[in-house]
Amino acid sequence: MQRIPRDQARKFAFDWRDEPLLRVEPGESFEVETFDASDGYIRTEADKAIPARRPGFDRVPPLVNPIAGPIWVEGAERGDALVIAIEDIEVDDSSWIAIGPRRGPLGESTRWPELSSGYTTKVFRHTPGPSGTTRDGTLHFDDRRSWPITPFLGTLGVAPDREVTTSNDGQGEWGGNLDIRDVAPGNKILLPIFHRGARFYLGDVHASQGDTEFTGTAAETKATVRLRLELKKGHRIPGMRIEKPASLVAVHAEKPLDLAVETATTHLMDWLISEYGLTPIDAYCLVSTCPDFRINVYQMCRIRNLRPVAGAEIPKTYVLGGSP
């Protein structure tokens, strides 16, 4: 099986000019070893997210949130859709979160000054599950609180059409730093393709995260990711789509949040109309009346140029004309 080792997974931009690190056939499984968002800097609670101490923060923009790629998909052309099937994510034996002055919405808090007066790093221990690995393991927040590890890819995308954007705050219809908890094993992610070969990048695995990633970081960790890439030839889509076993999700990143929600919803309607045969009237009325239609606010971080990320989700049962 082809693999990108961790020491090569250190790009900091989605750049169509990069030489491919890997070339794969559609449907071929391969593995990528990813760094955490700190590029390996944070290992213990003594490692604080102080910009002056962090390697790469002397650059503008800073070199953080490394990704692996590009990965060239044979036969991919502009106007096709890339289908990312995540087969497995095995995270490291720990993860971390970092807060401090001017980080996140409470980085200047006077109500709780301990959130803004100094830097804090928390490291979470991971223990294996029944498989003997972290695939089904547990994250220990502290001695009293724990939950199942629920890993996902925080940053993924193809090379944008003409621009070059950073892995730290680049976002668009092509992907980027979106921190969507549904970009996880068992789901398929669809992206529009803008260049030959697709030129796909990935990284920034989280062991778990709550909606919005409120502090600006979550359970950041290293990981080994196994996936395969497939193509839908001549299949133009307006932005990221996620097909879960039981539901469909259309994703959009935009400011303000209400525009992200509105656009994600119209993209979902487009999906229902163009591929499932609903009329525009039925699609419009369905998203407003279905009690199981949901808006997920995946990411809403106050970090540089990041925009809120919304997902409009509806169960497949309603789309196919049934009842729950």
Image (tube, helix red, strand yellow):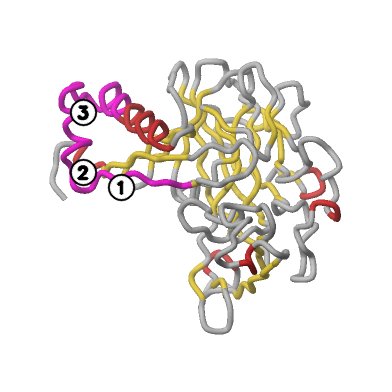
Q: Secondary structure at mark 1?
A: loop
Q: Which residues are magenta?
A: 269-298
Q: Relative to 159, say whether 228 is above or below.
A: below
Residue to which mark 3 is pinned: 284
Q: Position of residue 43 (x, y in %)?
A: 77, 65
Looking at the picture, tell me which residue is in the foreground, 226 or 59: 59
Labelled disc at residue 246: 1
Sequence-wise, the earlier of marks 2 and 1 is 1
Give the residue type at disc 3.
Tyr
- State the residue at coordinates (45%, 16%): 234
- State the residue at coordinates (53%, 53%): 213
Labelled disc at residue 56: none
Sequence-wise, the earlier of marks 3 and 2 is 3
Horizontal side of 292 relative to 43 (left or right) equals left
Magenta stretch, main secondary structure, is helix
Asked if disc 2 and disc 1 are in contact, CB closer than 8 Å, the reply is yes
Horizontal side of 264 relative to 73 (left or right) equals left
Between tags 3 and 1, which lies in front?
3
Q: Relative to 198, say whether 303 is above or below.
A: below
Asked if disc 3 and disc 2 are in contact, CB closer than 8 Å, the reply is no
Between tags 3 and 2, which lies in front?
3
Looking at the picture, tell me which residue is in the foreground, 65 or 272: 65
Is 271 magenta? The answer is yes
